[in-house]
Amino acid sequence: MEITPDVVVTLRPDEVFVFGSNAAGQHGGGAARVAYEKFGAVWGEGHGLHGQSYAIDTMSGLGVLAREARAFVEFAAEHPDLRFLLTPVGCGIAGYTPEQVAPLFAGVPDNVAVPSSFVPYL
């Protein structure tokens, strides 16, 4: 299993930065701000692929996060030509722990790098 770097400052053309967002797509802080400023996240879009970023709503409850995680895993599997760098979504402002969030990403395909904090729970 490949590990996402703790800090991502550049991406190759085939890489996608996967970050936690809110449903309204207000990318004001943390990884969301990095995605907005560097990797093509769109203000007002809190879900899915935009530029070289993929937004996962982590602020609308654990049930929504679970659905978003499943959708992402399916999306990544459908795009084997891309490499996804999953950040520790939900473990910052949203307030969840890796133990709560990581299992939601069980079954990620090989083209997804995961945060080291998720590894024990996958």
Image: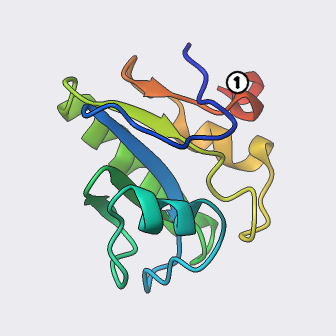
- Residue placed at 43% from the left, 68% from the top? 36
Residue 33, located in which quarter of the rendered image? Answer: bottom right
* Vertical position of residue 26 compared to residue 12: above or below: below
Q: Quadrant of the N terminus?
A: top right
Q: Quadrant of the C terminus?
A: top right
Residue 116 vs residue 69, the one in the foreground: 116
Does residue 99 appear left or right of residue 15 in this picture?
A: right
- Judge left or right: residue 90 versus residue 86: right
- Taking 81 as reference, is 78 above or below it? below
Work out whether 112 lies above or below 61.
Answer: above
What residue sits 36% from the left and 42% below the top?
16
* In this rendering, position of residue 11 left or right of residue 5: left
Residue 120 appears at what percent x and percent y?
77, 23
- Residue 84 against residue 49 in the figure, above or below: above
Say which quarter of the image contains residue 44.
bottom left
Q: Secondary structure at mark 1?
A: helix
- Number of numbered discs overlaid on the protein picture: 1
**Residue 72 point in image, percent of width and height:** 37, 47
For badge 1, the amino acid type reads Val
State the residue in front, 16 or 66. 16
Q: Position of residue 18 (x, y in %)?
A: 46, 48
Determine which residue is flagged by label 1: 119
Q: Position of residue 54 (x, y in %)?
A: 37, 54
Query: How dense is the environment of label 1, judged by Cα within 10 Å: few (below 14), some, or many (20 and up)?
Result: some
User: Which one is in front, 63 or 117?
Assistant: 117
Name the image colouring: rainbow
The residue lying at 74 percent from left, 70 percent from top is 93
